[in-house]
Amino acid sequence: MDLMDRFRQGDRRALARLITHVENGTPVGRAAMRELYGATGRGRSIGVTGPPGTGKSTLVDQLASVFRKEGLRIAIVCVDPSSPFTGGAILADRVRMRHLQDDPEVFIRSMASRGALGGLSRATGSVLKVLDAFGFDVILLETVGVGQGEVEVVREAETCLVIEVPGLGDGIQAIKAGILEIGHVFVVNKSDNPGADRVAEQILTMLSLNPVPPPWQPPVVQTVATKGAGVEDLARQVRRHWEHLDAQNLRREHLGRRRIADLAEILKCRALGAASQRVLSRPEYSELRRKVELGQMDPYEAADRLLPFDGIEEWRLP
Amino acid sequence: MPDSQTKIRVIVAKPGLDGHDRGAKVIARALRDAGMEVIYTGLRQTPSQIVQTVIQEDAYCLCISILSGAHNHLFPEILKLLGEADVQDVLILGGGIIPPEDVPALKKLGVSEVFGPGTSTSDTVKYIREHVQPRA
Amino acid sequence: MKRTPKPGPLEKWERETLPRSLERMPERRSTFVTTSGHPVPRLATPAGGDAPAEIGLPGEFPYTRGIYPTMYRSRLWTMRQFAGFGTAEETNERFKYLLEHGQTGLSTAFDLPTLMGYDSDHPYSHGEVGREGVAVCNLADMEVLFDRIPLDKVSVSMTINSPAAPIFAMFLGVAEKQGVGFTKLNGTLQNDILKEYIAQKEYVFPPGPSMRLVVDSIEYCQREVPRWNTISISGYHIREAGSTAIQELAFTLANGMAYVQAAKARGLDVDEFAPRLSFFFNAHNDLFEEVAKYRAARRIWAKMMRDSFGAKSPASWLLRTHAQTAGCSLTAQQPEVNIVRTTIQALAAILGGTQSLHTNSMDEALALPTEKAVRIALRTQQVLAFESGAANVVDPLGGSWYVEQLTDQMEQGAMDYFRRIDELGGVIPAIEAGFFQREIAEAAYRYQKEIETKDRTIVGVNDFALEESPIEILKIDPALEKKQLERLSAVKSRRDNDRVRLELGRLREAATGTANVFPPLLACARAYATLGEMMDVFREVYGEYVEEATF
Ligand SMILES: Nc1nc2c(ncn2[C@@H]2O[C@H](COP(=O)(O)OP(=O)(O)OP(=O)(O)O)[C@@H](O)[C@H]2O)c(=O)[nH]1
Ligand SMILES: [Mg+2]
């Protein structure tokens, strides 16, 4: 049976293999995306972001357990950074997801960022769609914990949780970096440590400084992920956000925005791909590259010869 | 051999009750430094959890580190579950303290190679590169 | 008027410290001579003068040269081989064998299910019962384990950490049955949970509640089992996990200080409990650095205990230690060569002034040791004790420029680590932040890379290798798991289950509140409650710990 048929019949191994195709950008993966695209937009996606070690994985584990009790089918995608030097990665978020490992209705996939910045990998959005099309009710997405505005996540997830903890020294720092705008629910995890109330207050204060109050007022929830405390409340707030999205027709808006972003991304990839293929296959490329390397020619000069500015219009994109 | 665009994804699993993760961590790092993507399961994974991880992560290779002496119990269990799930194309390697005379039986079960104490990590890296089955 | 000059430290030592010690611990012989017939001095000192105060004199603060004035001239170290495998019967046999062969203390290894607090019939135990040590599920197993071993005469050490409290309660139960009063019991509980989070990873509960159980045991022993060594603060496993010697030294002493702080915070008197803390270090290949590590450990501990923790009694300043040769240094290739490694390592521990020693068997890189391998390991210690002459003089390397310099460096390196740990908020926050784990993983990786690039030579592994045939190793009888399970179910059907429930309920009350858990644990043990049942009570109350994955 072919991979897509198995996928449609709910075969988890086919799902896993398809994700590999999509992640690696193979022809099979590209064809599958085209085929599945129409079936996406059903599952709820929740992004979880925050500085390293704040308890994102532990929280995802707990939150997923709450949703599981409600009978929802859960997929989890965890992104960890690739080494910029070797391209390798150690993906260790699963270590925390103890409660879910034996549950046949939970699917966890680890991904390396593969050089992409912004907390996700280039293929993450597509992988979420594959999981969505497979039929998961909720898709949780844990971003790389770099703590500097993983804004990519808002494009992919309709509900975005921002995790903070007390005692990071400079709680405001992470909030400053543009994260205030992306959070739909703010979580102060590790509330068993001193200073949690203060962090919560700080976040509320900063939210209240927003000049144009948005229709959705992001709540701040305190949790102790290791003990599961506050997680029920968190799940409730997430549901409230879903209801808000539905009531205001915002879900449609979000999906619309995402489709446009997808189009832009696809065009960008193709344009880049086409351009680089043309340029890199030019016979003089390696010669010019060598010259640039040795400092005998500056890169602008080389670029002008390989791809003169006014030559761009000449390409005939299919 | 997978082409250079794709990454070899390897699971480093630590079944059994012991906590001796020195070897597992050294090999995980060495594989990462060789450009692979390593999924680390953490300590004390049951055979069924390991098999679920292999399936969900669509790993090319599963490295199982056992130092507790329970290899003759744990390997057969993991391989049985992999068989039941019809997982055929994953390269399975063993490491840790496994006496040489137990190795033939493990290989018959489907373990490709066992890397005992003193194996260099570069040998393991090389072995994986040469033996993983292509994916996508 | 003529003034007599104030006596120097050496003179004072000879006049006061030494005679007092000789009275309590006379030397083994009236004279010690070299093989050439020359007398061996008790203690070599700088020509015509005193050593710097940092080096000092043996048996005196800061104990760099040893904790006793005469060291092995009076009493050799205790030769203590770790044993335990299979069922309680088999280990009991091995114990008796070792005692007959001249071993002077017993050391118990438990199997992994026991170490993790699971009974042999727990699903996780399958395949692991009796493998790395003996399975102990309840008092009945413990009774068999120490059958006809007089607990008032033989000192027993038990390598157990997370479930140390329930296991010790069972041990006390056996002592009661033998009619041996608790005050006569002598031995050591490893009970060092901090190094589990740092290195060996056999933890069950989060650090906070684990520390509470440790302090409960200190408090209980101080009152009821006064000669018992309550914690064996262990660097051994830290080293085995791949640390450097300095890391081993620093992390172990930092853990020691954390226990002292926790016990003081309970309101216990440092001079009451500190003398019952002991240590356990690794002995690795780098002979002189290892010797320096032991000497620096004593010096740092003495200073810390006196100056930072306000201990007044010299007994609190002493760092008494057990040593074990480095299991991680043994090679599967040409295993006989391990005997040589072990000899060097054992010599390091002895030159470092250890109080007791376990020498590894040559085949331990492959499996559990055979009887022959265990015997050779013990013989190694005997050769060092009786033939090498190393035991005839106190601190033979003291005053070596190299060793003194290394000792200072080790101390400095440890102090640097203490500062970093303090900056992280102490040992437990540093554990939670993965600090130790990361430092160790880094060192282990570096060591492995050095071997692979041949920057470091390991004989028989990356140089001088041979094609070889495997040596004989011990097989664990697969039937023993069945035997153990049968005994467990027999005990469960024989015991009074209502009483077990009642006692477990009382244990839960103590665990939830602040009362010492030992009295209810002892009652549970007497009722033949199982280890798993007692640990489950703690698991429910305290939760289970999952560590940060660090690389
Ligand atoms: N005290 C306390 N510790 C917590 C809490 N939640 C998580 N932790 C601990 O924080 C550490 C990090 O947790 P993770 O869940 O791995 O955090 P993360 O944000 O996923 O980490 P990265 O993926 O590495 O960025 C672990 O040691 C957890 O046990 C909490 O509520 N209280
Ligand atoms: Mg994480």
Image (cartoon, rainbow, N blue to C red):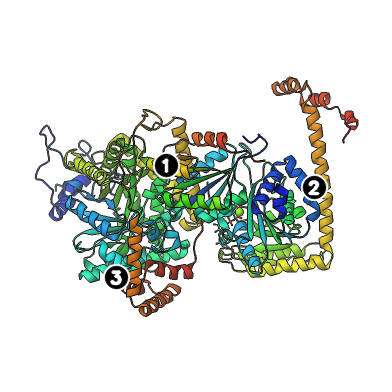
Asked if residue B63 shows in the view, the reply is: yes
Q: CA distance from mark 1 to mark 2?
A: 47 Å
Foreground: disc 1 or disc 2: 1
Q: Quadrant of residue C457?
A: top left
Residue found at x 76% / y 59%: A158
- Circle 3 residue: C223
Q: CA distance from mark 3 to mark 2?
A: 75 Å
- Circle 2 residue: A34
Mark 3, secondary structure of its residue: helix
| Label pair 1/2, CB-CB below 8 angstroms | no
Asked if residue A150 shows in the view, the reply is: no
- Which amino acid lies under the numbered mark 3 shown in the image of this protein? Arg
Residue found at x 41% / y 32%: C456
- Circle 1 residue: B103
- Count of numbered circles in the view: 3
- Which amino acid lies under the numbered mark 1 shown in the image of this protein? Val
